[in-house]
Image (spheres, rainbow, N blue to C red):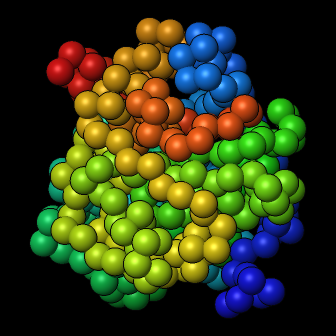
């Protein structure tokens, strides 16, 4: 895979947009003069917390699952996830008339487990601090004869995630920078592919929690770096190492990574709730946290920002915002 033969192209993202049209929501873009004044830029917020299942993950899950053969769909789908991809695959499976078996960490927030169960999925749990979810997930899929839809290591998943950025630019025009949360790297890989395909000069800035800076370290090293399982309130970004496929894209297209602390994430959640009237989960608030904390260097005039999800229980939201 080279720059002349990338694993995911802008055409792939446009094809994904056509496939998910009418199934996924075209989420709103919010603009706040208060936020603009605080950060010194014109900021456009792509609200994926209003996407089906409450996060951007449905875009990629449905784009990938809808391309399975009738025989694969008849046998069912498997996935592994810390929460949002689980719900996305469960809903995609229901939409496509099949079943889903999801491997989830034992400490997944109960609200995310309950949501996946509510969409009809079977849940199998593991210990995220001692188990290898990729190995366990692959073994589960093989044992049961299921088609595996991974959370980010798949071209159709990446292309589907990129449709959020495509919609944002279609609505607001050219952006000087696009700021995107980074976990395994699928959202930013798809976003960067979409954005640079339309406006090559747009800077792509990823945001990670300080405890989970595997992508930042990897980009600096020029190769994938593994870290201990991160302990952060941003559970959706608790990746140990970037995906091989996503990193092959991000090392070419991502211009930088900003880091935010758990306290800065909490402050962004509070700001979104109090000033924007938006509920965000911790992972969904990290890009906003980076802007509010001044973590993005040389912030330009027009900035797009992905609020990636809002799946959080009332109790957990109150606990985090009060601490």
Q: Is residue 195 visible?
A: yes
Q: Is residue 3 above or below residue 130?
A: below
Considering depth in this image, is 15 or 31 the residue closer to the camera?
31
Residue 18 placed where, x, y %?
86, 56
Give me the residue at 57% from left, 80% from top.
248
Q: Position of residue 241 (x, y in %)?
A: 35, 72
User: Residue 8's x, y, as percent?
Assistant: 72, 75
Q: Quadrant of residue 253?
A: bottom right
| Left or right position of 139 against 222 | left
Task: Please identify the quadrant where the C terminus is shown.
Answer: top left
Residue at coordinates 41% horizontally, 63% vertically from top-left? 216
The residue lying furthest to the front in this view is: 298
Q: Quadrant of the N terminus?
A: bottom right
Q: Relative to residue 80, is residue 18 depicted above or below?
A: above
Q: Is residue 308 visible?
A: no
* Closer to the camera in the image, 296 or 287: 296
Relative vertical location of residue 123 with respect to residue 1 in this rendering, above or below: above
Tell me how many marks there are. Answer: 0
Whether residue 211 sits left or right of residue 181 in the image: it is: left
Please identify the quarter of the rendering in which residue 34 is found. top right
Q: Relative to 131, is 298 on the left or the right?
A: right
Viewer-side residue, 252 vs 13: 252
Residue drawn at x 60%, y 60% is 255
- Relative to 323, 41 lies left or right: right
Question: In x, y percent, where is residue 121?
Answer: 41, 55
Q: Residue at x 34, y 33 (%)?
A: 265
């Amino acid at each position: 895979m080279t720059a002349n033969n990338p694993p995911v192209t802008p055409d792939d993202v446009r094809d994904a947009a056509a496939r998910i049209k009418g199934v996924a929501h075209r989420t709103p873009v919010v603009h706040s003069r208060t936020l603009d004044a605080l950060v010194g830029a014109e900021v456009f917020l792509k609200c994926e917390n209003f996407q089906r299942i409450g996060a951007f993950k449905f875009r990629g899950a449905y784009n990938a699952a809808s391309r399975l053969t009738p025989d694969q769909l008849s046998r069912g789908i498997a996935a592994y996830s810390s929460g949002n991809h689980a719900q996305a695959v469960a809903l995609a499976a229901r939409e496509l008339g099949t079943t889903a078996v999801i491997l989830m960490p034992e400490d997944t927030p109960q609200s995310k487990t309950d949501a996946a169960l509510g969409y009809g999925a079977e849940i199998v749990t593991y210990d995220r601090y001692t188990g290898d979810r990729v190995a366990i997930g692959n073994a589960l899929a093989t044992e049961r004869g299921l088609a595996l839809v991974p959370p980010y290591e798949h071209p159709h998943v990446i292309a589907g995630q990129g449709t959020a950025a495509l919609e944002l630019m279609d609505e607001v025009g050219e952006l000087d920078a696009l700021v995107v949360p980074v976990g395994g790297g699928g959202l930013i890989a798809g976003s960067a592919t979409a954005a640079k395909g339309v406006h090559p000069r747009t800077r792509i800035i990823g945001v990670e929690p300080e405890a989970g800076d595997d992508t930042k370290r990897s980009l600096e090293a020029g190769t994938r770096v593994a870290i201990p399982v991160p302990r952060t309130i941003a559970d959706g970004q608790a990746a140990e190492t970037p995906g091989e496929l996503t990193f092959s894209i991000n090392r070419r297209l991502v211009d930088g990574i900003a880091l935010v602390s758990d306290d800065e994430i909490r402050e962004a959640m509070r700001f979104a709730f109090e000033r924007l009237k938006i509920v965000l989960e911790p992972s969904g608030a990290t890009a906003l946290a980076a802007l509010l904390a001044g973590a993005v260097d040389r912030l330009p005039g027009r900035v797009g920002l992905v609020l990636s999800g809002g799946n959080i229980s009332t109790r957990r939201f109150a606990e985090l915002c009060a601490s």
